[in-house]
Amino acid sequence: MSIFSKIKSAIFGEHGPLGSGHFGTPKTEAAPAPQTTAAQPAPTPTAAAAAPVPAAPVAPTAPVDVESVLAGIAQRKGSDLNWRSSIVDLMKLLDLDSSLDNRKELATELGYTGAKDGSAEMNIWLHKAVMRELEKTGGTVPAALKD
């Protein structure tokens, strides 16, 4: 799983649409099969019963408010990490490895073209790029976190 996928899962899995725990995958339960007994005759098929029943339309999902999810995680953990501007602190908040090797991998995934040396320039770019990607994949992100 890519580093960005882990970040996305940590955020969207926290508050995925339809309460599924996985972004975009609704919880479903199988309906119990009708039970018949030997005393009951088997129902005869009718034209209405033979017609396929269309699936119920899925309601559009609301975007995940990324800032409020992250603030909630920070509050539950009693964290004072600077996740709003630091990629290292954001990854730590989400219990992800924030090592330089992982940040280099994330930089490659997101198309960073500068030196992958852990510089402030790289880290600032990574944080903003992660926020922009989260928005592209169904999150609501305030402009201050992506610009």
Image: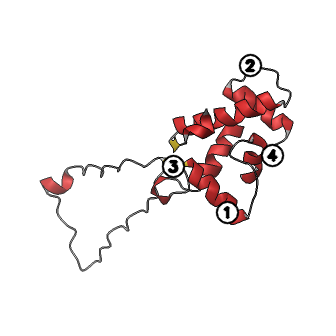
- Front-most of residues 112 and 141: 141
Tell me what residue is drawn at x 20 percent, y 53 percent. 50
The residue carrying mark 4 is: 97
Q: CA distance from mark 4 to mark 3?
A: 23 Å
Query: How far across and down, in percent of the image, does residue 4 sit?
Result: 67, 38
Mark 1 or mark 2: whose residue is earlier in sequence: 1
Mark 4 or 2: in front is 2
Tell me: residue 32, above or below residue 67: below
Q: Secondary structure at mark 1?
A: helix
Residue 146 in the figure: left or right of residue 55: right
Q: Amino acid at mark 2?
A: Thr
Mark 1 or 2: in front is 1
Mark 4 or mark 1: whose residue is earlier in sequence: 1
Tell me: residue 95, above or below residue 1: below
The image quadrant of residue 131 is top right
Q: CA distance from mark 1 to mark 2?
A: 35 Å
Residue 43 in the figure: left or right of residue 10: left
Q: Amino acid at mark 4?
A: Asp
Q: Residues within 10 Å of mark 4 (few under 14, many from 20)?
A: few
Q: Secondary structure at mark 2?
A: loop
- Residue 75 disc label: 1
Q: CA distance from mark 4 to mark 1?
A: 20 Å
Q: Amino acid at mark 1?
A: Gln
The residue carrying mark 2 is: 113
Mark 4 or 1: in front is 1
Residue 46 in the figure: left or right of residue 93: left
The residue carrying mark 3 is: 64
Mark 4 or 3: in front is 3
Mark 4 or mark 2: whose residue is earlier in sequence: 4
Mark 2 or mark 3: whose residue is earlier in sequence: 3
